[in-house]
Amino acid sequence: MSAEALSHHLAHSVSLVDPSEYRPEYKKTEDFRNFAVGITPGHVVRNYRRMHRKQTLQFASEKKKEWCRLNHAELTIMEALESLNALVDESDPDVDLPNAFHAFQTAEGIRAKHPDKDWLQLTGLIHDIGKMMALWGEPQWAVVGDTYPVGCAPSDTIVFGRESFAGNPDLDNDKLNTRLGIYEENCGLSDVTMTWGHDEYMYHVMRQNTCHLPEEAYYIVRFHSFYPWHTSGAYDYLCNNKDRHMLSWVLEFNKFDLYTKCPHVPELDELIPYYQGLIDKYLPGKLRF
């Protein structure tokens, strides 16, 4: 797809504020991810309440089987990004722009700080593409928002706390409502079932298509929304040494995923040729979704 075609759908693009500063001046660091009662938009609260009530071990397992067939579409990365123009994330209190804007903001923030890590830049561009599930009929509470393990007791560090899980049937199951639940100490996150959402979906899209990105990129895509782990330190008892090593990359990525969110968007005509080159290098051609 040409730069002109994508830019047409991203109307009124303007230059991103100084890309060397990934934290926009209009908002202080401590003001991001503010889920305080009375401040958080109602649609964000509703989305999380539904997620915490309906995301169960059985639900997540069944959704994984359903979506990992990858039988919904065949798209290039640029075509997938274009589709995100139709999506505004209902779980995000920090931005109300279509998700395609956020993709380029994240990538450009990384590019400014890590010009030698083109794989990380591309990871920033693609990390939210799994949100396309919402455009294909999946409710947003099963697509967006912070992720966490199912099959064990929810951590108090999850957004809105454990009380928001009232009505979730897994809480009535003694096997699923303990610290370890169905897991073993330090089993590794690869053996843990996470809530179903765009992170897990895009991870499997990458695994099942031609993808030359390094393992760090897979971890970033799969766990960038796992805030209870990478920001609050929860669930470390499920992690192995590989998970702990990869955590530093998830944390580094999180700076750009979070703090580049602002009302300003990049000039796509100038950026698309560069990122198309990265796509051709790491994720070429059409991918099965």
Image (spheres, rainbow, N blue to C red):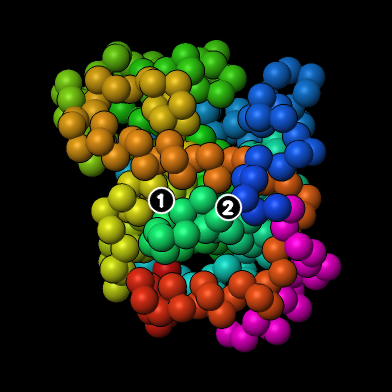
**Compared with residue 9, is residue 188 higher up or lower down, i.e. above or below?**
above
| Magenta-drawn stretch contains 12 | yes
Q: Residues within 10 Å of mark 1 (few under 14, many from 20)?
A: many
Residue occupying image coordinates x 36% and y 30%: 150
**Residue 59 in view of the camera:** no
**Compared with residue 114, is residue 207 higher up or lower down, i.e. above or below?**
below
Residue occupying image coordinates x 51% and y 51%: 113
Q: Earlier in the sequence, mark 1 or mark 2?
A: 2
Q: What element carries label 1?
A: helix
List x then y, in percent, for residue 57.
35, 34
List x then y, in percent, for residue 45.
68, 29
Between the C-alphas of marks 1 and 2, the distance is 17 Å
Task: Identify the residue position indicated by label 2 in the image.
Answer: 109
Residue occupying image coordinates x 33% and y 35%: 247
Q: Residue 221 got which mark?
A: 1
List x then y, in percent, for residue 65.
32, 54
Q: Which quadrant is home to the N terminus?
A: bottom right
Q: Quadrant of residue 14?
A: bottom right
Tell whether 213 sits left or right of 32.
left
> Which mark's residue is nearer the viewer, 1 or 2?
2
Q: Which quadrant is home to the C terminus?
A: bottom left
Residue type marked 1 = Val
Tell whether 190 sits left or right of 122.
left
Q: How many marks overall?
A: 2
Residue occupying image coordinates x 69% and y 83%: 5
* Closer-to-camera residue (25/194): 25
Range shown magenta: 1-17
